[in-house]
Image (spheres, rainbow, N blue to C red):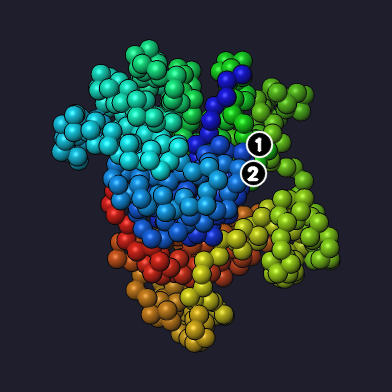
Amino acid sequence: MRKIYIFDTTLRDGEQSPGVNLNTREKVEIAYQLEKLGVDRIEAGFPAASPGDLAAVNAVARAVKNASIIGLSRAREQDIDAVREALKGAQDPCLHLFLATSPIHRQYKLRMEKEQVKDTARSAIRYARQYFDKVEFSLEDAGRTEYDFMVEMVTMAVEEGAYVVNIPDTVGFLTPYEYGNIFKHLKENVPNIEKVQLSAHCHDDLGMATANALAAILNGADQIEGTINGIGERAGNTSLEEVAMALETRQDFFNAKTSLTLSEIARTSRLVSKLTGMVVPGNKAIVGANAFAHESGIHQDGMLKEKTTYEIMSPETIGFKATKLVMGKHSGRHAFREHLIELGYNLEEEALNEAFAKFKILADKKKEISDDDLFALLEERLADAPELFQLDSLFVSFDSEGSPTAKIRLSTSDGEVREEESSGNGSVDSIYNAIDKASQEEVKLADYSIKGVTQGKDALGEVHVALTQDGITAQGRGVSTDILEASARAYVDSLNRLVEKRKTYGRRDNISMI
């Protein structure tokens, strides 16, 4: 069966989702999980974008051993040099070079004629090949590029020794028939096309990213580029778990498959959702909460008689488990540790002690602790931002006939304690006004959402908050059985991330990417 390589760009294109800002520790955490998932290639970032991104790519390059690590670069020597620096220590480094080729990009963005575009790309590939054995070249906006010029550009890339040639549908414009036909045309018209792997990189603006990627496979694509949960700019990218399970479930049709460890899909999806703050919709294919849920009486009857009447995949295949409610307040530290190992968390001693202390606090508030409770507790710990501000205490007074009042106490990283009191239009507004006064930061609340992490009246609630300041956006989250406490923690978490982003990453260039 034909092998399809998986190029994961969650850490690069996925991080370009508005409001998402992964710090170095979070990028490495996701990269480790992608390695466990078995992806072939990990695009860790765009090193020329900022010093922080370069450092994060380097951290991933040094940490991951079983996947090729890739850095993105424009067709500029300084960008290529930044990738060289970032990929020091990588066992299998690859440079991903891109240049736009469509008429609209040539005219309005690059202000270049066809020959200038080809010469610029040729020079960049030649320069890159001096330092990298593996160079992937992408024709940005290939989907709207003339067929004859696309053939010229791919032929040039093959001649210059590119390892992979990527044909992106950068703006999600094409239909599956059109996109698949591009690969067929290139296979038939580019000399020595067998010397390179052809790659498909699709965006989901018209909701056809997965369909287009599968059409590319049917017409000869060797590699699929995408993200976990389909996150990315605008409407997102090809959802890698959808492609993998489509190939797995319909082997009879595609006669191709990935080498992913499918049982790691659910955990990878959950981790990416937690660390990016991007909630997976309940009806999301493969990894949504409702993907394996059945409410209709007719469906339930069929499932009781034979699961395959309404399930074409089993939840166990991607790592979903039915076992719940296995831990409680009487559980000891040893049992707690063993259960975490069963769930895939092998924590160091200090991290285990911290997690166990949080577990005991939660167990005193809840009668029963489910695996989902533990996932929420642990992954909140993994996602902690550097704490410039820490919430020490919160008191809220509410009277239905008057304005609610909130008192908060914050500690700063240099040991200062700040206490403030404020009122507002509601309890949450009061809390946020008090935090603003204590932090002395002027921010705007861009988004606020609540969801239940687990079931029951004493369920954990998770709050997501997005704050903006001078064009910079950061997301944070808080988890608690008390929704007001979760709201306060989410706001402080977002505030810490905003300050860290402003301090460490700075403002990124407004650069069009594939």
The residue at 60%/46% (across/down) is 65
Quarter containing the N terminus: top right
Q: Is residue 407 placed above or below 465 in the rendered structure?
A: below
Q: Is residue 298 placed above or below 265 in the rendered structure?
A: above
- Please provide percent x and percent y for residue 374: 70, 57
Which residue appears farthest toward the front when viewing the image?
130
Q: Which residue is mark 2?
A: 36
Is residue 435 toward the left or the right of residue 6 in the image?
A: left
The residue at 56%/37% (across/down) is 40
Between 167 and 484, the one nearer to me in the picture:
167
For label 1, the crowd category at 10 Å Cα-Cα, with few meaning under 14, some 14 to 19 and many 20 or more, is some
The residue at 19%/39% (across/down) is 110
Do the CB atoms of the residues marked 2 and 1 lie less than 8 Å apart?
yes
- Please provide percent x and percent y for residue 172: 35, 32
Between 383 and 48, the one nearer to me in the picture:
48
Quarter containing the C terminus: top left
Q: Is residue 60 visible?
A: no
Q: Which residue is mark 1?
A: 261
Is residue 486 toward the left or the right of residue 340 in the image?
A: left
Say what amino acid the circle numbered 2 marks.
Lys
Disc 2, SS: helix
- Please provide percent x and percent y for residue 94: 46, 41
